[in-house]
Amino acid sequence: MKALVPGVVSPTGRLFALAMVAISFLAWPLDAQTRLMYLRGQSVHPAFEGWWPNDDGSYTLWFGYMNSNWEEELDVPVGPNNYLAFSEPGGLDDLEIEAYDPADADQGQPTHIYPRRNPFLFTITVPADFGDTELVWTLTTNGHTHRAFASLRGDYRMDPQVMSTEVGGAFGSLDDRLRTNLPPVIDVDGDLHRTVRVGEPVPLIAFSRDPDNYPPREDRDRIPESLDELYSAGGVGSVVASGAPGMRFSWTVYRGPAEDVSFDPEQLKAWMDTRVWGNSPWSPPYVLPELPPEDRWVTHATFSEPGEYVLRAVASDGSHFNYQNVTVVVTP
């Protein structure tokens, strides 16, 4: 089913299918614990995803977040409401403690917050002598403050297979080959710092491919008939959204208001939207776009307001991720 290609499915057909899906989903038995869907007004929880060692002795720390809202997007500039800080163990357990320091606050975290789960979103490399230090991400949204505590504790060590399991990669597969899975490579053509005017399209050309072609592409081309087909309960012991494997690429707004940025063609969502026809690899049904000739991905971004924006190229095989940023200064 090519239902996600714009213009292929009529609105009437799509509404009918959505109605049938809603009826079938309501027919499934409810869990003992009812889950509510909030469109807006809820807070965002930063997340420490885990760490792994690097060949040079340093360590990579992975971060993401969970936005409890299904529709509300937020912009939280680096500052007292969005900062990272180094701490001794337990030093920032008390949320009343303010640790904002402009010298350390900006560690490359996002300032535009998309809905729902955005896993393995950015990394921070720490030195070999990091020891028992904690790197704490503080995020205040909709009046609530939450923190993520990154450390080198042994139970947070991960590998690419753990990453895949956490995002429901390859439909939740636990194949041992995922332990050595390579991330896609990205090479953005042109300057990574650009200046344009409002309304002037910015060509974004990237060369991106999956070097090991694993996991192999497999479309989710039909509506699931049970919750087990939508979610994967394997791996880490918690139910996660099951994602379609295969190379995909998209641009997101990493810093700056996304409402002022339009992409042509429209980009697939990099966040875990599990709603049917959600234009997301975690959304059923979903057919991954065909790979472009010579692995050359061409997009145009247009800005409606002046300011400084960071656009992020996101490449994934469904189990592993890679990124590259482009900073765009938009003048009136």
Image (cartoon, helix red, strand yellow):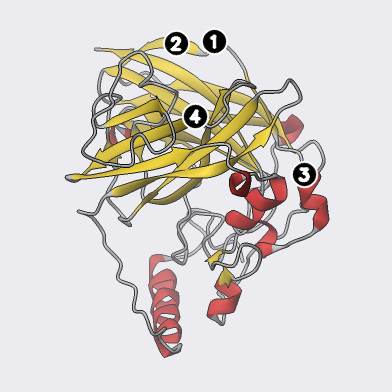
Which residue is identified by label 1?
191
Count of marks placed on residues: 4
Disc sitting over residue 181 in the figure: 3
The residues tagged by marks 4 and 2 sit, at their Cα atoms, a distance apart of: 37 Å
Residue designated by label 4: 133
Above or below for 95 versus 34 = above
Residue type highlighted by circle 1: Asp
Regarding residue 24, the answer to whether it shows in the image is yes
Pick whichever of labels 2 and 3 is earlier in the sequence.
Answer: 3
Q: CA distance from mark 1 to mark 4?
A: 36 Å
CA–CA distance between discs 2 and 1?
Answer: 6 Å
x, y percent for residue 231: 56, 70
Name the residue located 83 percent from the left edge and 52 percent from the top edge: 177
Q: Amino acid at mark 4?
A: Thr
Q: Residue at x 36, y 79 (%)?
A: 33
Asked if disc 2 and disc 1 are in contact, CB closer than 8 Å, the reply is yes
Label 4 or label 3, whichever comes before in sequence order: 4
Residue at 74 percent across and 61 percent down: it is 174
Q: Hey, what amino acid is under mark 2?
A: Arg
Q: Nearer the viewer, residue 224 or 174?
A: 174
Considering only vertical position in the picture, is 282 above or below 100? below
Q: Which of labels 1 and 4 is toward the front?
A: 4
Q: Mark 2 — residue?
A: 194
Residue kind at label 3, given as amino acid type: Asn
